[in-house]
Amino acid sequence: MTTVLPARKLKVGILGATGTVGQRFIVLLETHPLFTIHALGASPRSAGKPYDQVVRWKMNAPYTKAVGSLVVQACEPQPFADCDVVFSGLDSSVAGDVESAFLKADIAVFSNAKNHRMGANIPLIVPTANPEHLTVIEHQRAQHNLKYGFLVTNANCSTTGLVVVLRALQDAFGPLSHVMVTTMQAISGAGYPGVSSLDILDNVIPLIDGEEDKMETEVAKILGSVLPDNSGFRALDNTVVSATCNRVAVVDGHTECVSVKFARSTDPSFSPPTVAEVDKVLSDFQSESQLLGCYSAPKHPIVVATQPDRPQPRLDRDTHGGNTVTVGRIRPCPVLDLKFTLLVHNTVLGAAGSSILNAELAVAKGVLKARE
Amino acid sequence: MTTVLPARKLKVGILGATGTVGQRFIVLLETHPLFTIHALGASPRSAGKPYDQVVRWKMNAPYTKAVGSLVVQACEPQPFADCDVVFSGLDSSVAGDVESAFLKADIAVFSNAKNHRMGANIPLIVPTANPEHLTVIEHQRAQHNLKYGFLVTNANCSTTGLVVVLRALQDAFGPLSHVMVTTMQAISGAGYPGVSSLDILDNVIPLIDGEEDKMETEVAKILGSVLPDNSGFRALDNTVVSATCNRVAVVDGHTECVSVKFARSTDPSFSPPTVAEVDKVLSDFQSESQLLGCYSAPKHPIVVATQPDRPQPRLDRDTHGGNTVTVGRIRPCPVLDLKFTLLVHNTVLGAAGSSILNAELAVAKGVLKARE
Amino acid sequence: MTTVLPARKLKVGILGATGTVGQRFIVLLETHPLFTIHALGASPRSAGKPYDQVVRWKMNAPYTKAVGSLVVQACEPQPFADCDVVFSGLDSSVAGDVESAFLKADIAVFSNAKNHRMGANIPLIVPTANPEHLTVIEHQRAQHNLKYGFLVTNANCSTTGLVVVLRALQDAFGPLSHVMVTTMQAISGAGYPGVSSLDILDNVIPLIDGEEDKMETEVAKILGSVLPDNSGFRALDNTVVSATCNRVAVVDGHTECVSVKFARSTDPSFSPPTVAEVDKVLSDFQSESQLLGCYSAPKHPIVVATQPDRPQPRLDRDTHGGNTVTVGRIRPCPVLDLKFTLLVHNTVLGAAGSSILNAELAVAKGVLKARE
Amino acid sequence: MTTVLPARKLKVGILGATGTVGQRFIVLLETHPLFTIHALGASPRSAGKPYDQVVRWKMNAPYTKAVGSLVVQACEPQPFADCDVVFSGLDSSVAGDVESAFLKADIAVFSNAKNHRMGANIPLIVPTANPEHLTVIEHQRAQHNLKYGFLVTNANCSTTGLVVVLRALQDAFGPLSHVMVTTMQAISGAGYPGVSSLDILDNVIPLIDGEEDKMETEVAKILGSVLPDNSGFRALDNTVVSATCNRVAVVDGHTECVSVKFARSTDPSFSPPTVAEVDKVLSDFQSESQLLGCYSAPKHPIVVATQPDRPQPRLDRDTHGGNTVTVGRIRPCPVLDLKFTLLVHNTVLGAAGSSILNAELAVAKGVLKARE
């Protein structure tokens, strides 16, 4: 299986390029075989200056001189008109209008922002969970009369890790009726400066504004199906999710303690899958991103840890380049059916990495193409 | 309400005096109006030397010169024969036999170790949850033919915080059928040297050996009732507990995310209590330790946080001297009935503080007396 | 020695009451025998509302209902006109003008801000190092024609710990020609939200803007002498200080590694003091705040740690209520004469605690009085 | 410049393979073009079992199945007889005798342990500082009548970062008379389990046993010269080093605050180099490892940070694969001549990485060869 390459490298624009997600986009795209960084967008305050002068770089890998010398643009369609694709790491306070403007300007956009996620014909895609939702792009193009443009969103970082595993379980053992999840989330999820050190050193913050609601609503859309006419999505309506979100003193990597109940569990003849069965199903799970040979696709969407005290954020977040979900502690749940703990790299698969892998999928499926 | 004082200060022995729990006992007892530190016990390696020479002191308050000059004893009954009460902070590898020997030697023992917790006529007491279980002491004394001696244990640190709140809910709204709890536990719970810094800095450990089992079994005994003949306890048999325990980078203070379902919830006419009702019930909850005016009793066994992002370990663990449980984020649970987050100081109420408050209760109830 | 009490409790105003230093003032003053909190000042945005509604409380001890219900004032002299003394925890962006206005309005001000520290007749006082500098207040009053008012500043938090020890060494062994200091400073020194968690978790920040310059200049004024006519200060002019300041992942407590050279060291007949001599001199050091029986005065301005791996911030910062400096690792320096490590609680002695102890000194010396 | 390759990949043995340094050796060697992992040695307790069964893996990159299935050997020469080179990550409690035995058995050893560092004809080499010291190997071979064997040590992790920069300064501006260094060292330097989390969370430990002495003595040997007859080394005798070593809450990467004085500084005509001159000298510094095209040689032995608040361990430790030293904050020192802050990755360049780069140098110079 080899990476599907476009006719030429696609020109990439990055919106919100000075922020945490934007910086991660730059790190992941600088050596990417399909994409080349072509334009950077940031706030009006930064526009007109070289990236080097305006960024407060916080990644632990450097950016190239070529990127550093790019003149930052305002986040408007015109300066990005010759980009084949735009990745948006914009803050939700501005992302809604900006991304709509880009869509209308016939530019393909992959967005990390929450604003359009629940839009009726906007795919909300975790690349190793529901890549088939990309088919709704055609409906978008028809609606807005577009040739190249479309808008695809990816999920909240905590949702992302969860749905990959839920999808694998659902495919193997049927629908889930109940999902309980308690998260321990990394500080990088809040951007920079984000979480004050006085709030997190020797501490836990038991609330992340809006996060629980996102987890409880996004799951149903992502695990739902595409409508027969491709005009939108049918959300799961029988899966109840209860989320509790905490912030802990971890730099990168969200840990999630999950319990699930299978819909068939009310059937007296049903016995929940054994730990060995779950282990095998998760380990063997494959998504279209593997099957299509996407460059950033992890070898396995899910890795089951072999040590009993894993996954751990510091040790497991970078597995397969941060695009895999690591699962451990699979065991029966006395209250629901099954318990396990998962880990997702919140700024790779949980943010920029999802967008990029989504774009690779769109290239492989022929939806994202070089402008002619 | 004033503190009940014995005829004279009771002479206290501390077993495991060089360990983390033992050091906490010393800090809490040095200025205590009922107790005076009389003897210290530690491993054979330390016995015979002044405490000053053998302790590696890790508390952030100093010990007195008087304590420092006490000659450490072996953990055998003889050198503690004139103690009115002994507090045990022994490691579970030795606590079982040592505490049995002290009991047989007619010495009153309050133990933090897990060894005897599930013993048939051994009270497992969280002082602000089930002080009435002290009545079984009479049966112990009859069995072993004791005048002064008895053995009372306190619960695992994570169990402790949980049962105080469950007791208040159960008293007000009836039995609980299901309890789901996910903990984020402090490093001090593992003693010294305990958790390696390489395992916890920028990390979460998703497993604490044996902890989940303790939480799932201790709850039923603590929230159960004393048998009519006072010979032991009847555990709850219809409450299912599912625990998931994690270690996080916090020095002191266990945070627990809890969801509960009420037994009456299957009754169509039952509606779960509102957030305001739960808030009032928890805030108003009183235990015998308050009613009897015990010295270390917190003003309120449970404090409901008024800020939406609380409780937080660093800010709330020391409320009422670390003997209260702080609850926040009370809200409905989409899967069970009710969700909330609680915080307990694991080395105060969750360990040494419980033992001391249990001893104060025993004094107030006339069970623990000065030797004549 | 007993605390000197004024005729009645002095009415206290606190400027910058919602900030980190302001909150610390409230904690330290709520139970103070000389002072009673009378008025709180904060930004115009907060003025006119009860403190309870505008503060984001971050101390680990609660404030009283009385404080919570105080209506916050603008930071202007008028609403503080009946205060006997005002403590300023204002940010340096506004402190300069505000404090000048209060001084002119004949109000006694003790300030933490840096703005007026180097003013010609403004005492810069670390209470356990140079309390005699208070005598310049008379000159201030004469200059501005004041009856009650004056302005006293305290030093930068890192300077504070250092000068207490340098003063003791200088008194015993003569002037210092060279001082090298490398600090590891706590995050609370930067206020709230202050240091981003992404900058300090698993990290060190090797720069604190302006801090090295403050340390290098403040030392000379503090260790200098009052001019014969009490009109100002004569700074040390033969002591060279070289400071390097780092931020580390510690909540409270600045650690400083110090090397010093004595001026007499160039004299061939001089041999530097031994470790035992230094230990004794530091342990025996007494300041006027002890001699005058000030309430907050630590029993010892300097405590010499007995364990070889101390001082440590988490274990030693609260010694004597955070108003002492702990010193350890006293040993010869191969390059200069003497090396040691010190610890100072940066938000107690290093900030609010110094102001309060300075005010107690001013009461004891009869300079600060109740308004008639 | 291309990497010099031996005739075939050299077979590598790793002693102490289950420890922290040993695990790092495995990560760095698994994909190395010159070396192939051939044998693993560990304690008798582990010997005879597959590596997979005995290692508690703590690196954040996995090891291969091939390594996992290697049967662990006792640390004796016989099972390593067909290794071309052995890397020792042994603890100093056993390293002395074991490494001597390997040397006598004609096996080339590169050791991280401190035991032989100060041996008369044992090179103590930091590869980007004093590779020319390898010439003493001939004398070793003559002494012990060896064909393939020799013993090379690398320096303490803190020394390593320091001497690279001192060497560059000394080469450009002449000998240094005084060096003051205060370190803030990462927890990984103490191995696993190493530092207790209770000692380092919200804390600084101001003492690392033996570390200051190592820094003060190793510098003189490393910066010294080879004796004319190649029989050993002439240490610097006019450079005084004063070291203060602290442990901070950082996973990897030692930060060092350094002040230096040049020997010529006593000459009235000497003016210390400017910041710009120092910046250029450090940035331009090249070592033999670059000139010989060694595979692991960093592009630059020293990188001068361009941001004023750098170097920072989390952001800079991985530059050039962890084999470079990052320097920042270059400025005049009021007490000595020049101050700066440096960062070294303590488990790469400061440990396993130095050994491997030393071995690459030995291959490039023809000293380390494949057995025939």
Image (cartoon, coloured by chain):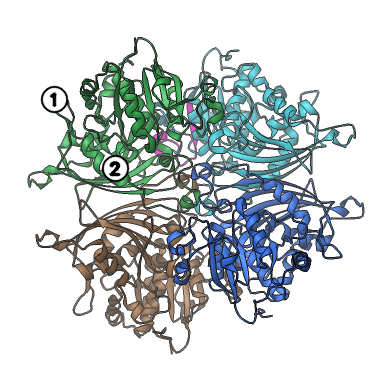
Chain colours: A blue, B cyan, C green, D brown
- Tell whether A228 sits left or right of A358: right
| Residue B61 position within the rendered picture, expressed as x and y whole percent measured from the top left | 44, 32
For the residue labelled by badge 2, is the local secondary structure a helix, a strand or a loop? helix
Q: Which of B346 and A242 is in front in this view?
A: A242
The tag earlier along the polypeptide, 1 or 2, is 2
Kindly report the distance in space between the C-alpha atoms of the residues bearing marks 1 and 2. 27 Å
| Residue B143 appearing in the image | no
Tell me if mark 1 has few (under 14), some (14-19) or many (20+) residues whose alpha carbon lies within 10 angstroms of its own.
Answer: few
Which quadrant holds residue C124?
Answer: top left
Q: Is residue D210 above or below residue B165?
A: below
Q: Which residue was labeled with disc 2?
A: C214
Amino acid under disc 1: Asp
- Taking the magenta stretch, the answer to whether it contains residue D218 is no
At x 22% / y 36%, what residue is drawn? C221
Q: Is residue D363 left or right of residue D133?
A: right
Q: Report the magenta residues as a range.
A: B38-56
Q: What chain is tagged by disc 1?
A: C
Q: Is residue B345 above or below residue B209?
A: above
- The label number, if any, that marks residue C229 in the structure image: 1
